[in-house]
């Protein structure tokens, strides 16, 4: 199977007919998707996956992505989808924010971002706004837009990956930013892109009782939702040399894992491929290239917008524990070792532990990360059964139903996962 993330979605649904803001019937709802994008490529990749699943044979929405990362322009957009990139926020290892590229103060940057977002949403006039993670936006940059959107009748949704951080940290952040009151005042639904039997975020983060009715657990987002599961097979049986793939997300904080991987001993006949990501400093990428130079069994790839073909070819995968990467590993049913990021959030550590506890992946404590440990795992003869089927991966097929629900379709036609 040649996997292409830009393939048309093949969900069998009827058109999203609805009565729009102007009272006229329409088959092309406008959907805006906001993400503040301060770390890595996860937010834009997840939003593009959501856009793909909504741009299916039964619907032709017009989708505007609002992204805070300029690398978003590198990704192929489905038909009907475009992206407005706003000046970027940067985030240091301690969680502090700054202007990523412009030589201006954080206050000046936020004024530019706030006014740009407000103008874009005012002109685009979305029927639905899907907000990624932060109800009020980074540094409250969405707050000026939310009341006006509500007056216009825009349906507003908060989209959350299943794990944000340590529960106590999230509760404190939500209290500090008045997040639950913002949800109460402006939001129609809360979509949690996960399986509540793995991690029940609404309870862990102490979501108020009156907001629980807005929660929809979608299941994890499956990047292969438009492919038959039988088409997904490991390269073990195709006669090719065995291979191990290492991915480090955007790469900004993946240098230690990348360096350990290129130095790890490989069993005879096993190929090793590293994807560094575009956010890793260029001098670090150059150094990694130098370390594998002349070794025919190792290669370094700096950036790919669609890692799925690489994952498909690999027999095993070593990765950090970002949401998208874990979903791809599970969907591909790959033997995997997760080495989670620990700072500035423990999100990846919690996710890796949850998946390891379910018997889906192996996990290496980041404090034990070294070339020797990676080489030991690569060389293991693994016969254990991976329990991929315990994970609900149906999020991408449920989202069109949730959109139909927001747009006023009969409930009988809506497939959701309300728990």
Image (cartoon, rainbow, N blue to C red):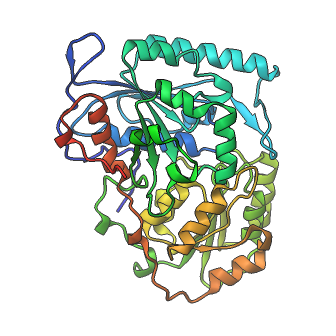
Name the foreground residue: 149 vs 30: 149
Any part of residue 178 in sight: yes
Q: Residue at x 27, y 30 (%)?
A: 60
Any part of residue 162 in sight: no
Q: Quadrant of residue 126?
A: top left
Q: Residue at x 65, y 81 (%)?
A: 377
In the image, residue 308 sits, relative to residue 403, either above or below, namely below
Residue 68 locus on image (x, y percent): 62, 30
Which quadrant would the N terminus be assigned to in this image?
Answer: bottom left
Q: Residue furthest front?
A: 209
In the image, residue 40 sits, relative to residue 115, either above or below, namely below
Residue 225 locus on image (x, y percent): 34, 54
Q: Residue at x 56, y 67 (%)?
A: 354
Q: Quadrant of residue 139?
A: top right
Q: Quadrant of residue 85?
A: top right
In the image, residue 37 sits, relative to residue 206, either above or below, namely above
In the image, residue 24 sits, relative to residue 85, either above or below, namely above
Q: Is residue 138 left or right of residue 130?
A: right
Q: Residue at x 44, y 58 (%)?
A: 196
Q: How many marks?
A: 0
Q: Is residue 16 left or right of residue 85?
A: left
Name the foreground residue: 139 vs 78: 139
Q: Is residue 340 left or right of residue 228?
A: right
């Amino acid at each position: 199977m040649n996997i292409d993330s830009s393939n048309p979605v093949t969900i069998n649904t009827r058109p999203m007919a609805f009565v729009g803001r102007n009272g006229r019937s329409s088959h092309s709802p406008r959907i805006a998707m906001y993400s503040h994008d301060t770390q890595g490529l996860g937010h834009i990749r997840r939003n593009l996956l959501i856009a793909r699943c909504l741009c299916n044979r039964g619907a032709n929405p017009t989708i505007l992505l609002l992204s805070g990362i300029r690398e978003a322009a590198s990704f192929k957009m489905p038909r009907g989808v475009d992206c407005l990139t706003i000046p970027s926020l940067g985030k240091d290892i301690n969680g502090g924010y700054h202007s990523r590229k412009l030589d201006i103060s954080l206050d000046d940057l936020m004024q530019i971002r706030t006014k740009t977002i407000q103008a874009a949403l005012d002109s685009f006039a979305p029927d639905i706004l899907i907000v990624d993670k932060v109800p009020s936006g980074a540094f409250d940059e969405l707050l000026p837009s939310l009341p006006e959107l509500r007056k216009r009748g825009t349906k507003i949704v908060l989209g959350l990956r299943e794990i944000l951080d340590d529960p106590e940290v999230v509760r404190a952040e939500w209290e500090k930013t008045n997040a639950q009151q913002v949800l109460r005042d402006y939001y129609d639904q809360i979509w949690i892109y996960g399986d509540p039997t793995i991690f029940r975020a609404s309870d862990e983060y102490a979501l108020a009782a009156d907001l629980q009715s807005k929660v929809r657990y979608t299941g994890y987002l499956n990047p292969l939702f438009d492919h038959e599961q039988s088409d997904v097979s490991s390269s073990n049986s195709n006669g090719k040399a065995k291979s191990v793939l290492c991915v480090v997300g955007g790469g900004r904080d993946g240098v230690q894992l990348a360096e350990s991987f290129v130095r790890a001993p490989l069993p005879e006949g096993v190929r090793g491929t590293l994807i560094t990501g575009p956010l890793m400093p260029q001098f670090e990428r150059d150094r990694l290239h130098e370390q594998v130079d002349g070794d025919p069994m190792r290669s370094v790839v700096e950036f790919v917008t669609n890692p799925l073909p690489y994952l498909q070819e690999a027999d095993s995968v070593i990765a950090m524990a970002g949401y998208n990467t874990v979903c791809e590993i599970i969907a591909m049913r790959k033997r995997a070792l997760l080495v989670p990021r620990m700072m500035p959030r423990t999100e990846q550590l919690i996710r890796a532990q949850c998946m390891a506890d379910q018997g889906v992946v192996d996990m290496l404590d980041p404090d034990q990360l070294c070339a020797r440990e990676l080489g030991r795992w690569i060389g293991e003869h693994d016969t254990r059964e991976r329990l991929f089927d315990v994970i609900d991966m149906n999020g991408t097929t449920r989202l069109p139903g949730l959109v139909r629900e927001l747009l006023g379709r009969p409930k009988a036609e809506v497939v959701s996962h309300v728990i």
